[in-house]
Amino acid sequence: MLKGISPMLTPELLKVLCEMGHSDTIVIADGNFPAETMGKNSIVIRMDGHGVPEILEAILKVFPLDQYIEKPVSLMERVPGDNADVSIWKKYDEIVSKEEARGVKVIQKLERFAFYEEAKKAYAIIATSETSQYANVILQKGCVL
C-alpha cells in the first residue's frame, strides 16, 4: 500500500499507467464490453467486482489528460433507438469536472463501432463488472507539467 494512492490502483494498473506515454489511451470497460477481443494487441487488466466510476475517479487523480487535444475523454454513444439508461454519464461528468480543470468540455461521444476501433488501438483495457450499459470510457494521456 502507498500513502495517498487509492487501493483501487493495483500494482499492475499503476505499472501500466506509468508505462503509458503522451497520447496513449486506456479503456475502462463495462461488463458487457468485449475486452479480450478488443484487447488482442493491448494489455487487459481484470478488475472484476469493481465499477467504472470508482476506477475512473482513482485513475484521474494520478493520470493527466491530454492537454493538447480538445476531447481526451470518449464515451460510447447510445445506439439510435436504444432506450438504455445512461444516467452513469452524469457520474462521469461529476468525476471529470472534479479532476480536470477544463470540466465536461473534454468529453465526447463516439458512435459504437468508432469507439470499438479506438479501443483496439488502446495501450490497455480495464475489464470491470460494471452493469450499466454504455458505461465504457477511453482516456487519452497527456503530460505532467
Image (cartoon, rainbow, N blue to C red):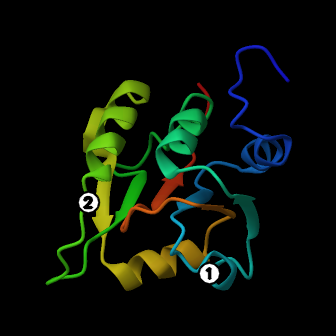
Determine the residue located farthest toward the top in the rendered image.
3
Q: Nearer the viewer, mark 2 or mark 1?
A: 2
Q: In which quadrant of the rendered view does residue 112 lie?
A: bottom left
SS type, badge 2 = loop
Whether 42 is drawn above or below 89: the answer is below
Residue under the image location 39 percent in, 62 percent down:
132
Nearer to me, 35 or 142: 35
Q: Residues within 10 Å of mark 1 (few under 14, many from 20)?
A: some
Residue under the image location 39 percent in, 59 percent down: 74
Q: Is residue 22 above or below residue 59?
A: below
Amino acid at circle 2:
Val
Query: Which amino acid type is shown beneath numbered disc 1?
Result: Met
106 sits left or right of 130 in the view? left
Give x and y (percent) for residue 19: 79, 48
Above or below: residue 26 compared with residue 102: below
Q: From the viewer's perspective, tell me whether residue 15 is left or right of residue 37.
A: right
- Seen at 16% across and 82% down, the residue is 80
> Which of the two labelled residues, at mark 2 and mark 1, occupies the earlier sequence position?
1
Q: Choose between 96 and 35: the one closer to the eye.
A: 35
Most foreground residue, 62 or 102: 62
| SS at circle 1 | helix
Q: Indicate the quadrant containing the C terminus: top left, top right, bottom left or bottom right.
A: top right
Q: Which mark is residue 86?
A: 2
Residue where numbered disc 1 is placed: 38
The image shows residue 50 at horizontal and vertical percentages of: 60, 49
Query: Residue at image x 50%, y 59%?
Result: 130
